[in-house]
Amino acid sequence: MAREETACCIVGGGPAGMMLGLLLARAGVRVQVLEKHGDFLRDFRGDTVHASTLTLLDELGLGESFWAIPHRLLAQALLPLSGPRPVTVDLDLLPGPHKHIAMVPQWDLLGLLARAAGQEPTFTLRMATEVTGLLREGDAVTGVRYRTQDGQCGELHATLTVACDGRTSTVRAASGLRHRDFGVPLDVWWFRLPRHPGDPEGLAARAGRGGALVLIDRGEYFQVGYLIRKGSDARMRAEGIDAFRTRLAALLPRMPDRAAAVRSWDEVKLLNVRLDRMQRWFTPGLLCIGDAAHAMSPIGGVGINLAIQDAVATARLLAAPLLAGRVGGRDLARVQLRRWLPTVVTQSLQWVMHQTLVKHGLTGAADAAERDTPPKPALLLQRFRRLRAALAHVIAIGVLPEHAPAFARRPPTPPSRGPEAVGPRATPRP
């Protein structure tokens, strides 16, 4: 077996992995990204590109290319399950040029980052390459074992391995590093519904007694996230597909006929929602970031933003040690220290939302009057615009936004569309 070597091995070609690969390559670091799938075309990924990420893309010189991608712009964020109607969180009070969240299929964002990184001579992207284990010398991780889609196995030795492979991280499991699970009251069903002319554009939420859903406009169809109680998947499936269609039609009173488009449970995929955080994100030769270090709830859609900010901080703090060929424990600790506070604050806010807005709607209440009364946090948000603006800042920008390091910046390209513009509909993928 040939011995392959690189300075940095990134496991996972999601937003954190691709952003980190691009930034390190622009610093001149030899970096390889290993992605187990053969392409980026998967339905069940977040589509939100937040304001701080839009600013980052401008700093990287990718703004003009990004706005050429079919997109929607959201001037408000919606929080479902706040009683009889969702809470809207205004984004027009955000600082900076981007007072919105862009809705872009994640495969298009990843493709943009992959093309930009591919222009750097030290960058390699290996698709259809699944990491199966870690290489070690004593207590230190020295790389990974992998298997390609055609069954070939190999080893990639690296000064640093970075786990960006999500909440079910193979690398995290193999590392032996521990994490704390905070518990959540919900899971999510993902499925498609046809979209007709005149239907809501961008992102829409629908809430009712005992349930809620989010509609993501994908052009000719909606990607639907249907919130259910944690652990209720098997019981609700046992009630039959007709019972599900009835619930779905009740949440979509203006288009109840769409529920019939779900023909079987095979079309409804379960997202096992988790909210957890590693106590320590690193061990010698290995660092975990993004959902691999701190799995986020889908509430607020902040997971992608937080993962990208982790990647930016990692690149800024570790590019020089990687170029020098030595990354010590103190270097890795600096990354966790930098990103610890925004992670804890964001997860704490998500936990509060779970226990108030979300749990209130999913678990039901003693009587109809109580069910139809918004919980106190929702009433406060509905009443005070400045409170909504503060929450908008946390959602759209983050607690500690990261900016592109100097070595990765390129001449800025301003957005080709104004904040009020709505781009063409996204073209659905097969």
Image (spheres, rainbow, N blue to C red):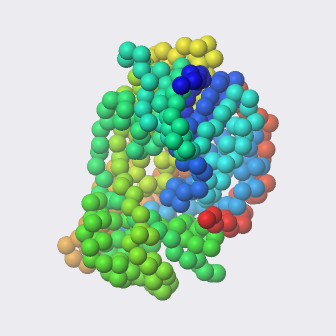
Q: Is residue 325 above or below residue 363?
A: above
Q: Is residue 348 above or below residue 428?
A: above
Quarter in which the C terminus is drawn: bottom right
Residue for point 62% across, 28% down: 31
In the image, farthest residue toward the left: 366
Residue for point 40% across, 44% down: 168
**Left or right, residue 365 beside residue 84:** left
**x then y, percent, for residue 193:** 51, 75
**x then y, percent, for residue 129:** 54, 40
Residue for point 63% across, 64% down: 429
Of the pair 83 and 292, the residue shown nearer to us = 292
Residue for point 41% across, 76% down: 264
**x then y, percent, for residue 350:** 38, 50
**x then y, percent, for residue 298:** 44, 54
Task: Say which quarter of the image contains residue 211.
Answer: bottom left
Q: Is residue 31 above or below residue 152?
A: above
- Count of numbered labels shown in the rendering: 0
